[in-house]
Image (cartoon, rainbow, N blue to C red):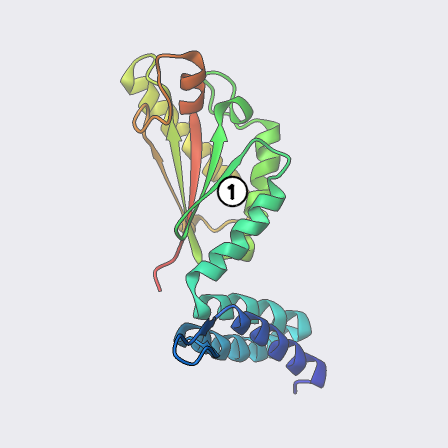
Amino acid sequence: MLNKKQVLIAAIVAGALAVTGCTTNPLTGQQEMNKAATYGLGAAAACGIAGALISGGKGARNAALACGAIGAGVGVYMDNQEKELREKLANTQVQVNRVGDQIKLVMPESITFALNSYAVSGAAQGALGNVANVLNQYPETTITVNGYTDSSGALAYNMKLSQQRAQAVANVLRADGVAGSRISTRGYGPESPVASNATADGRAKNRRVEILINPKPQ
């Protein structure tokens, strides 16, 4: 049976999620809840009660947040995840970028690998541990790890190194508990440069690993 505290937690979390889904009716000037928020509120309440049955008050809160956010809109779910990633990676050189519902983490070679190596550095492993911690709290996403190099050297070598680096980063995430079924990898070599390969600074920016976090299709 649910106790009063557990039911209250589910209701409060659901209500908090619903607030962000209100819109103003241009004809009446009154605040109204849009359909997405209405569905999200129901999902939050239902999932919160289910969570309470399974895990008590904390389960109600976590379940309502996850289910309600998805019901109210994928954007909310990704917003929360982005916020936590920015907090966890604030003291690192890992870039956190947002494009629509996609979160992109950019790991430069300078902090991730030694020159011509695909062994993940200790500092990068620590950062990836924080990334994995967040990813494990938001299971309704997929992760694509892409490796890139500059244009120096043989193309075949660069393609192989970029794949090895992407795989090495993915292996760290898996070791930190992220389900392998969520992760895919690919090495692009010198494709898709973000800067000019004509300068040392540009080549350094091109040597990177990107972690793309996308919501699962609903």
Q: Position of residue 135 (x, y in %)?
A: 52, 51
Residue 27: image quadrant is bottom left
Let me know if residue 135 appears in the view: no
Residue at 45% from the left image edge and 16% from the top image edge: 201
Q: In the displayed structure, would residue 73 be above or below residue 151?
A: below
Image location of residue 6, percent across then percent down? 67, 79
User: Is residue 21 rendered to the left or right of residue 147?
Assistant: right
Instruction: Give the image location of residue 173, x and y in percent.
Output: 51, 42
In the depicted structure, whether residue 157 falls above or below residue 74? above
Above or below 9: residue 170: above
Vertical side of 164 occupied by 143: above or below: below
Mark 1 is surrounded, within 10 Å at the Cα level, by few (under 14), some (14 to 19) or many (20 or more) other residues, namely many
* Residue assigned mark 1: 173
Residue drawn at (67%, 75%) of the image: 56
**Disc 1 element:** helix
The quarter of the picture where the N terminus appears is bottom right
Query: Which amino acid type corresponds to the residue marked 1 in the rendered image?
Result: Leu
In front: 92, or 177? 92
Tell me where residue 36 appears, x and y as whole percent. Answer: 41, 72
Query: Toward the viewer: 82 or 216?
Result: 82
Quadrant of the rendered image containing residue 141:
bottom left
